[in-house]
Amino acid sequence: MTVKIFIKRDVQDKNFAELTALLKSLRALTLNQPGYISGETLQRIDKTNESMVISTWRSVGDWNNWVNNPRRLELQTKIDQLLGTETDYAVYE
């Protein structure tokens, strides 16, 4: 059964350029992961510093494999340090 992952981040203008580079690297890695189907990035209109990624995976197992990928963890740690807060994940089926 496919799952949707909602990934919320609070982005400050001062971090935008560096964050963009990290997110592009993360996205490039995601495209080659088994079970990855699609993803889209949305910007909240009434709170412009809030970003939402909606990612679709073939199964929760595929998502969990990606979440525990060492390269992803390395990039995610850099992203969270830059943002000063942990990225928020929600998994739905």
Image (tube, grey):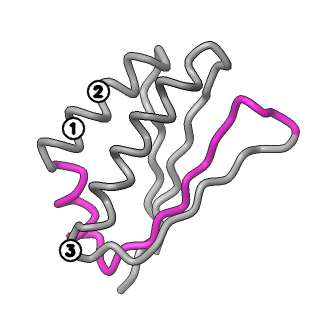
Marker disc for residue 77 = 2
Q: CA–CA distance between discs 2 and 3? A: 22 Å
Tag 2–tag 1 contact (CB < 8 Å)? yes
Q: Say few, some or many: other residues with alpha carbon within 10 Å of mark 1 (under 14 / 14 to 19 / 20 or more).
A: some
Could you say where residue 13 lies in the image, as x and y percent from the top left? 67, 19
The verdict on residue 70 being magenta is: no
Q: Is residue 34 left or right of residue 87?
A: left
Q: CA–CA distance between discs 3 and 1? A: 17 Å
Q: Residue furthest left?
A: 70
Which residue is painted at 51% across and 35% down in the image? 20
Could you say where residue 72 lies in the image, as x and y percent from the top left? 23, 44
Q: Is residue 86 above or below residue 50?
A: above
Quarter where residue 34 is shown: bottom left
Q: Say few, some or many: other residues with alpha carbon within 10 Å of mark 2 (under 14 / 14 to 19 / 20 or more).
A: few
What's the residue type where badge 2 is placed? Thr
The verdict on residue 62 being magenta is: yes
Name the residue beneath numbered marker 1: 73
Could you say where residue 81 lies in the image, as x and y percent from the top left? 37, 17
Read off the magenta span: 46-68
The kind of secondary structure element at disc 1 is helix
